[in-house]
């Protein structure tokens, strides 16, 4: 396991910002860490990176404890905080050299590491500028470069695409997916479509507790529970009554915008698709549409955190 979080708690007075959470992340996983503002995402990330000490519990990063081996943990992690702490008066290359030296990169490797980061983070056209002259999106790229300059085994990225335009978001998303093939990545974001497109697995935290853990498909299936279909049938007779007579159907509601259109909810653990099809055949009706209604990740998130 690349990261093992064990009964982690952070308490401020009587308030628990993080409340006894545990989870494991495998080497090579890209994990999305979601939650509303104040849920405990950034606090958890700060404890994993040794930026903040936990009240109780422990985290092991590649086998090293944040309580007893903090220096070892820091060397294994690349961290991009939510508010990117770059030095605005420094040129990009000088800042990356400084970051590499702080992270203990050998002098002989620093030039090649800087060149690699400038290339991978798309900074070549801006590399001679001071950071203060850059747009917010390019400053974010510099932050990503400093997080990766020492080639860490684990990357923790708190809102890495903040301030980027749509084209830049696609580029950074591809970079993160490529990094996930060789590193462990924890990615925090409020953009759910971005998390779904980038991450292998999603953790949702609410009020300091983990409330969901799984792939986006798994979370949607768990939230949906019962099959929900949208159908449209062309035929004569009381179609709604016939649908309600099917053994697998629990509820039927007419859809006003569609002629003979219905929303059909199946009974738990049953599917109505075959019965609906057979019903249409036996009554010589035309089945014009039958579409499964998929629960969106946004709906899952709202249900778990409202």
Image (spheres, rainbow, N blue to C red):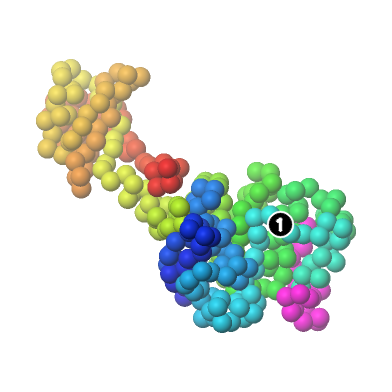
- Asked if residue 39 is positioned above or below residue 259 in the image, the reply reads below
Q: Residue at x 17, y 29 (%)?
A: 243
Q: Going 74% across and 79% down the picture, which residue do you hit?
A: 104
Q: Is residue 41 visible?
A: yes
According to the picture, the residue beneath numbered tag 1 turns out to be 84
Range of residues picked out in magenta: 101-123
Position of the C terminus, as image quadrant, is top left
Residue 158: percent from left, percent from top: 61, 57
As helix, strand or loop, the secondary structure at mark 1 comes to loop
Which residue is at 21% across, 20% downward?
A: 235
235 or 24: nearer the viewer: 24
Crowd class of label 1 (few under 14; some 14 to 19; many from 20; radius 10 Å): some
Q: Residue furthest front?
A: 13
Q: Residue at x 20, y 32 (%)?
A: 251
Q: Which of the 4 image quadrants contains residue 244?
A: top left
Tell me if I can see residue 2 in this picture. Answer: no
Residue 276 vs residue 169: left or right? Answer: left
């Amino acid at each position: 396991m690349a990261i093992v979080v064990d009964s982690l708690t952070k308490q401020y007075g009587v308030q628990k910002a993080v409340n006894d959470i545990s989870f494991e992340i495998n080497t090579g996983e890209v994990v999305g860490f979601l939650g509303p503002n104040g849920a405990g995402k950034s606090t958890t990330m700060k404890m994993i990176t040794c930026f903040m000490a936990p009240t109780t519990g422990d985290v092991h990063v590649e086998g090293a404890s944040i309580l007893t081996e903090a220096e070892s943990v820091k060397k294994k992690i690349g961290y991009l905080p939510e508010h990117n702490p770059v030095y605005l008066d420094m040129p990009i290359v000088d800042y990356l050299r400084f970051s590499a030296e702080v992270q203990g990169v050998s002098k002989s490797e620093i030039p090649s590491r800087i060149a690699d980061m400038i290339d991978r983070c798309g900074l070549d056209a801006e590399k001679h500028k001071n950071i203060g002259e850059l747009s917010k999106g390019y400053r974010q790229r510099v932050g990503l470069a400093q997080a990766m300059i020492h080639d860490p085994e684990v990357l923790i990225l708190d809102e890495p695409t903040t301030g980027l335009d749509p084209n830049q978001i696609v580029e950074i998303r591809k970079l993160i997916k490529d990094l996930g093939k060789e590193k462990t990545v924890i990615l925090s974001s409020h953009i759910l479509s971005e998390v779904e497109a980038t991450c292998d697995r999603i953790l949702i935290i609410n009020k300091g507790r983990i409330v969901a853990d799984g792939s986006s498909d798994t979370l949607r299936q768990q939230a949906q529970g019962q099959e929900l279909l949208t159908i449209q049938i062309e035929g004569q007779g009381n179609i709604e009554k016939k649908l309600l007579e099917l053994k697998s159907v629990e509820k039927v509601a007419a859809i006003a915008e569609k002629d003979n259109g219905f929303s059909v909810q199946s009974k738990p653990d049953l599917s109505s698709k075959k019965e609906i099809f057979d019903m249409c055949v036996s009554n010589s009706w035309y089945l014009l549409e039958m579409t499964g209604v998929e629960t969106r990740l946004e709906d899952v998130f709202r249900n778990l955190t409202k």
